[in-house]
């Protein structure tokens, strides 16, 4: 399936540009909005996403046909697709998906984040999947939740469009799989590529910090945390940390 590409030099946020396309009737399934740079890139939980030229900033419009309750599942399809496509480009680097929608790379200095996703549904017909990959440059560590690493530092010699092409080649079949078979195969493929399954972790929520074992993922995309002595708890929004290896 070919998908259409809309190119912009500079935008506030490609997710906002995608919203404008929906608002003026120009949305199409699997249309991709790419920008060389973003002036107001945003991350999960209200954070800023530093978006210099050379990195990949794009948003994919996905028709969800009223399946708003299942839309979060596509974030796991996307993270698994990105792990697969980046693994082809960086055969010597271990890459893993980290809940909910990050991609982490193993470096000499521990696991570092190289990509993140921000999912925003618009009504019950569209999902905007915003994808940011630190292709050329990683933001400085200060004030960051996780240390970051760029693909360039990992040895990647291509550009951001090469990353986008590889990602879409893996993601489009995953969306078809999701439409045909639902979450079951997507969840399994994400769990197979995930970081820390069955391992102890710390989960930082808005007002509390939990510890437990990361044991799985439910239909809504919630992380299932097994808390010693307290049983299972579903986490829908939070930041997960694994002890350094
Ligand atoms: C995160 O890790 O917190 C998610 C980061 C998502 C960044 C991408 S860059 C393209 C799209 N536009 C945005 O403003 N954010 C997403």
Image (spheres, helix red, strand yellow):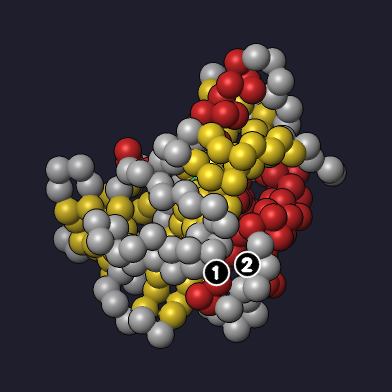
Q: Tell me the residue that label 2 is attached to.
A: 86
On the picture, is 188 further left or further right than 2? left
Name the disc covering residue 38, or none.
none
Which structural element holds mark 2? helix
Q: Tell me whether circle 1 and circle 2 mark residues in contact (CB < 8 Å).
A: yes
On the picture, is 81 further left or further right than 10? right
Q: Residue furthest top?
A: 24
Q: Nearer the viewer, residue 64 or 12?
A: 12
**What x and y, as percent, mark residue 189?**
61, 61
Q: Tell me the residue that label 1 is attached to.
A: 151
Q: What is the quadrant of the N terminus in the image?
A: top right
Classify 204 as above or below 159: above
Crowd band around label 2 with a 10 angstrom C-alpha radius: few (<14), some (14–19), many (20+): many
Q: Residue furthest right?
A: 1
Residue 176, image quadrant? top right
**What x and y, as percent, mark residue 146?**
32, 63
Q: Which residue corresponds to the image point at 30% horizontal and 64% vertical from the top-left? A: 141
Q: Which residue corresponds to the image point at 39% horizontal and 74% vertical from the top-left? A: 111
**What x and y, as percent, mark residue 172?**
74, 47
**Mark nearer the N terminus (1 vs 2):** 2
Which structural element holds mark 1? helix
Residue 218 visible in the shown view: no
Q: Nearer the viewer, residue 58 or 36?
A: 36
Q: CA distance from mark 1 to mark 2?
A: 9 Å
On the picture, is 120 further left or further right than 111? right
Residue 193, image quadrant? bottom right
């Amino acid at each position: 399936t070919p998908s259409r590409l809309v190119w912009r030099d500079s935008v506030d946020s490609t997710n906002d540009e995608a919203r404008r396309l929906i608002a003026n009737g120009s949305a199409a399934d699997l249309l991709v909005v790419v920008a060389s740079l973003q002036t107001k890139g945003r991350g999960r939980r209200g954070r800023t996403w530093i978006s210099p030229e050379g990195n990949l900033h794009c948003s994919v419009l996905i028709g969800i046909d009223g399946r708003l309750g299942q839309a979060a599942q596509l974030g796991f399809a996307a993270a698994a697709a990105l792990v697969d496509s980046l693994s082809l480009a960086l055969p010597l680097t271990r890459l893993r998906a980290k809940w909910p929608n990050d991609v982490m790379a193993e470096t000499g200095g521990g696991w570092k984040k190289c990509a993140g996703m921000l999912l925003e549904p618009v009504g019950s017909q569209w999902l905007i999947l915003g994808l940011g990959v630190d292709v050329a440059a990683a933001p400085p560590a200060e004030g960051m939740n996780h240390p970051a690493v760029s693909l360039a530092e990992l040895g990647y010699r291509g550009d951001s469009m090469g990353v986008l092409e590889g990602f879409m080649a893996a993601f489009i079949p995953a969306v078809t799989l999701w439409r045909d078979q639902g979450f079951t195969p997507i969840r399994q493929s994400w769990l197979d590529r995930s970081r820390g399954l069955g391992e102890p972790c710390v989960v930082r929520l808005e007002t509390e910090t939990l510890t437990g074992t990361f044991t799985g993922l439910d239909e809504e995309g919630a992380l299932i945390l097994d808390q010693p002595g307290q049983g299972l708890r579903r986490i829908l929004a939070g930041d997960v940390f694994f002890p350094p290896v």
